[in-house]
């Protein structure tokens, strides 16, 4: 029995399916907060919706009964097999040192609680392509702090870097959530059409981003936030329809048998297998065109959430993430 997620309306208290328990939730709403719900589970709220129509919650459920706690700027939940941690950092002049400190604290907790494997991270970065007080781009400032924290997590290698998303919000400040497993060993996957993000050249910033393109845990495949990047270069600047097609092609290739078998994984999927799809669109006016392309590629029977936020390079107009669920998810 594995960890699972589903989307839910934000008005109801997070609920689990029969025989399972809520681990934690992430609420896509209009203001940031890190709280425990009235049933006790952690909820990270992120300002990413432009109004009630875009608000939703992602609820993570697990087989075991979790323990929950909140301490200063971190909240966590764990059931013996899976751990969720979320953190919130208010707006700063410069992010590298406080991001490093917060992420190191989270990684120390991962180790202390005995969950050896981080398999998915989300990084919510307000004003992501804006400048910090010293003129450095906020995303690069964040990436540097996170990279320093990862070096203290398991040394300088990249083999432990999980699937991730690093995306803008509609406010300032940074938040994150992560998932780690106690026993299940994740398998991190690259996309042979894209340079591994941790090998991006210095032109994108002093430190490369610390993430893998996808992670397999059990029989689920977690697809990182994916943009219109081939090799390490943005393609189709200013053309949202072409960018969306490249994003969908990138994901189709990432999950394909061709890409997975080339990395020693005997499996293969299609875009239509994706669930829990989130689409981040820089300009609200582009949402209809992006939606049409996604429906054509992924089918209309799948619930897709659209959020109007900035992406981590100012020439990227759209980014997509999702999960190919395990066979027992029944989504
Ligand atoms: C879009 C890209 O990166 C984004 C930034 C990420 C991060 O910094 O964690 C992860 C995935 C994407 O959300 C990319 O570099 O391809």
Image: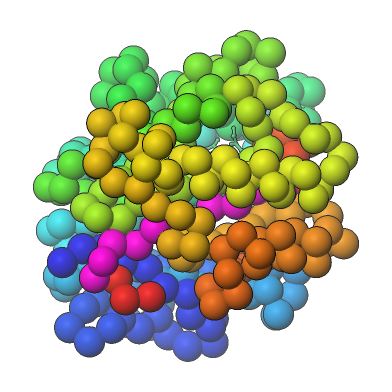
Query: Observer-nearest residue: 55 or 44?
Result: 55
Q: Residue at x 79, y 23 (%)?
A: 135
Q: Residue at x 78, y 44 (%)?
A: 242
The image shows a total of numbered marks equal to: 0
Residue 187 in which image quadrant: top left
Is residue 126 depicted above or below 130 in this figure? Answer: below
Extreme-front residue of the structure: 258
For this view, does 23 lie left or right of residue 111?
Answer: right
For this view, does 183 lie left or right of residue 121?
Answer: left
Q: Using the rendered image of the protein, determine whether residue 69 is visible from the camera's viewpoint.
A: no
Quarter of the picture holding the C terminus: bottom left
For this view, does 35 lie left or right of residue 77?
Answer: right
Image spot of residue 297 (x, y percent): 61, 60
Q: How is the image coloured?
A: rainbow
Is residue 265 depicted above or below 289 in this figure? Answer: above
Extreme-top residue of the structure: 202
Which segment did they paint magenta? Answer: 318-328
Q: Residue at x 68, y 13 (%)?
A: 203
Q: Residue at x 58, y 32 (%)?
A: 142
Quadrant of the image where one finds ligand 1: top right
Task: Assess whether residue 324 is covered by the magenta stretch.
Answer: yes
Magenta stretch prevailing secondary structure: strand
Image spot of residue 195 (x, y percent): 53, 22
């Amino acid at each position: 029995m594995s960890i699972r997620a589903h989307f839910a309306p934000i008005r109801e208290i997070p609920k689990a399916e029969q025989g399972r328990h809520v681990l934690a939730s992430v609420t896509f709403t209009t203001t940031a907060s890190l709280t425990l719900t009235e049933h006790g589970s952690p909820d990270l709220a992120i300002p990413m919706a432009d109004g009630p129509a875009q608000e939703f919650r992602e609820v993570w459920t697990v087989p075991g009964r979790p323990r929950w706690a909140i301490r200063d700027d971190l909240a966590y939940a764990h059931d013996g097999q899976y751990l969720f941690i979320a953190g919130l950092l208010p707006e700063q002049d410069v992010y590298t040192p406080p991001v490093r400190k917060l992420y190191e604290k989270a990684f120390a907790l991962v180790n202390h609680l005995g969950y050896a494997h981080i398999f998915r991270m989300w990084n919510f970065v307000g004003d992501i392509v804006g400048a910090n007080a010293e003129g450095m781009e906020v995303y690069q400032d964040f990436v540097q702090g996170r990279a320093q924290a990862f070096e203290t997590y398991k040394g300088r290698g990249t083999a432990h870097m999980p699937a991730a998303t690093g995306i803008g919000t509609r406010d300032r400040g940074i938040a994150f959530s992560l998932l780690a497993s106690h026993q299940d060993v994740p398998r991190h996957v690259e996309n042979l059409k894209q340079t591994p993000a941790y090998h991006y050249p210095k032109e994108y910033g002093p430190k490369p981003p610390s993430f893998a393109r996808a992670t397999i845990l059990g029989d689920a495949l977690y697809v990182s936030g994916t943009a219109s990047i081939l090799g390490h270069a943005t393609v189709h600047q200013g053309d949202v329809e072409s960018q969306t097609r490249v994003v969908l092609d990138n994901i189709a290739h990432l999950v394909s048998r061709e890409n997975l078998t080339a990395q020693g994984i005997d499996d293969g999927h299609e875009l239509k297998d994706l669930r829990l799809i989130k689409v981040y669109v820089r300009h609200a006016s582009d949402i209809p065109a992006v939606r049409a392309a996604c429906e054509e590629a992924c089918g209309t029977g799948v619930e897709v959430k659209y959020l109007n936020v900035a992406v981590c390079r100012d020439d990227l107009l759209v980014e997509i993430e999702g999960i190919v669920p395990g066979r027992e998810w029944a989504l």
